[in-house]
């Protein structure tokens, strides 16, 4: 059948993205014939031109780095959730042709934690201070009743995290990365750093850890996640986040709800195993 509706993930680099696997699995499970989901290598300079060429068959876009902030001035509307962290990972095109930016990373984080039984914590730790860390703070603003400690590498990053805390209504204390092992004393630790960054911390996992949310999905498991599981702690992984945020994207782009979480997760696990 010819394609009637289109969607895609954009970013640079993009070849590693699992989004096509997840969205196509959802389309198949929902019986959405004529829907296509692709990936395109697009950087910040090329983004305006790419958006200008999109026709009425386009339902939506998923965005990865470095486009989550760059897209904001190019959109007709941005949700309050996306505006709160200045990051759009989802664009939906309405029937009237308007482009609406949203952020499914934040509710995706909350859904992934809820799935593991984490609905409220009295304090939390965040490892790192990048774009994902600000989304983590936004998620924690909804479930953390006390202080969040962010472990960062520079004074500038510390200032940024405290600023995000003030904006999001979270009490943020910052600490040096050299003291990051202390993060594991909190009932919830969210690791937002690039691959390999937390490997040296694996030996510092306590005997009775709480919950670790490690946002990486490749390579998986990380050394930290393995050590955490070995000591009996609960682990939420990057694939959990990826699937839950993709579920919300599918629902927004297709208008079909609920999206097939189990089928999407199975497809993602199979794709990672095959790599």
Image (tube, rainbow, N blue to C red):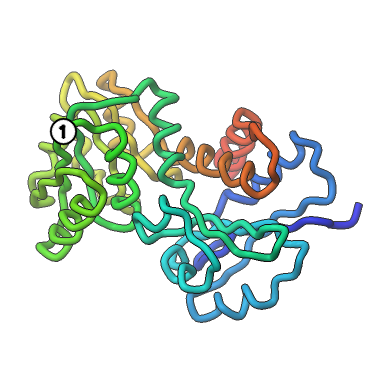
Query: In the rendered picture of this protein, how many numbered marks are placed on residues?
Result: 1
Asked which quadrant contains residue 241, the reply is top left
Q: Determine whether, in the image, residue 93 is placed left or right of residue 228.
A: right
Q: Which residue is drawn at the image coordinates 17% and 47% (left, top)?
A: 150
Q: Determine whether, in the image, residue 61 is placed left or right of residue 132.
A: right
Percent x, y for residue 263? Answer: 65, 31
- 229 or 89, which is in the foreground? 89
Q: Is any part of residue 22 visible from this angle?
A: no
Percent x, y for residue 218? Answer: 45, 46
Q: Which residue is drawn at the image coordinates 11% and 49% (left, top)?
A: 174
Q: Please, is residue 125 above or below residue 38 in the view?
A: above
Residue at the extreme front: 96
- 158 or 237, which is in the foreground? 158
Q: Please, is residue 179 above or below residue 90 in the view?
A: above
Residue at the extreme right: 1
* Residue where numbered disc 1 is placed: 146
Percent x, y for residue 239? Answer: 48, 39
**Kind of element beneath mark 1:** loop
Q: Which residue is drawn at the image coordinates 26% and 49% (left, top)?
A: 168
Percent x, y for residue 84? Answer: 35, 55
Q: Please, is residue 234 above or below residue 155 in the view?
A: above
Q: Determine whether, in the image, residue 91 is placed left or right of residue 116.
A: right
- 117 or 17, which is in the foreground? 117
Q: Is any part of residue 129 visible from this angle?
A: yes
């Amino acid at each position: 059948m010819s394609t009637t509706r289109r969607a895609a993930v954009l970013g640079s680099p993009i070849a590693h993205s699992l989004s096509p696997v997840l969205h196509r699995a959802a389309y198949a499970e929902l019986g959405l014939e004529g829907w296509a989901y692709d990936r395109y290598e697009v950087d910040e300079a090329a983004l305006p031109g790419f958006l200008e060429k999109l026709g009425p068959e386009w339902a939506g876009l998923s965005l990865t780095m470095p486009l989550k902030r760059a897209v904001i001035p190019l959109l007709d509307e941005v949700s309050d959730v996306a505006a709160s962290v200045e990051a759009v990972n989802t664009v939906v095109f309405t029937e009237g042709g308007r482009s609406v930016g949203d952020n499914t990373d934040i509710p995706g984080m909350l859904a992934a934690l809820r799935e593991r039984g984490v609905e409220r914590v009295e304090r939390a730790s965040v490892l790192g201070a990048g774009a994902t860390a600000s989304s983590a703070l936004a998620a924690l603003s909804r479930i953390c009743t006390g202080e969040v400690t962010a472990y960062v590498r520079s004074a500038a990053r510390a200032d940024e995290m405290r600023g995000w805390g003030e904006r999001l209504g979270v009490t943020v204390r910052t600490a040096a990365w050299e003291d990051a092992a202390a993060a594991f004393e909190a009932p919830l630790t969210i690791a937002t750093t690039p691959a390999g960054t937390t490997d040296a911390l694996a030996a510092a996992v306590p005997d009775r850890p709480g919950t670790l949310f490690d946002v990486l999905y490749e390579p998986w498991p990380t050394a930290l996640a393995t050590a955490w599981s070995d000591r009996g702690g609960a682990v939420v992984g990057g694939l959990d986040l990826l699937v839950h945020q993709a579920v919300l994207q599918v629902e927004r782009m297709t208008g079909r709800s609920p999206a097939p979480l189990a089928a999407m997760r199975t497809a993602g696990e199979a794709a990672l195993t095959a790599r």
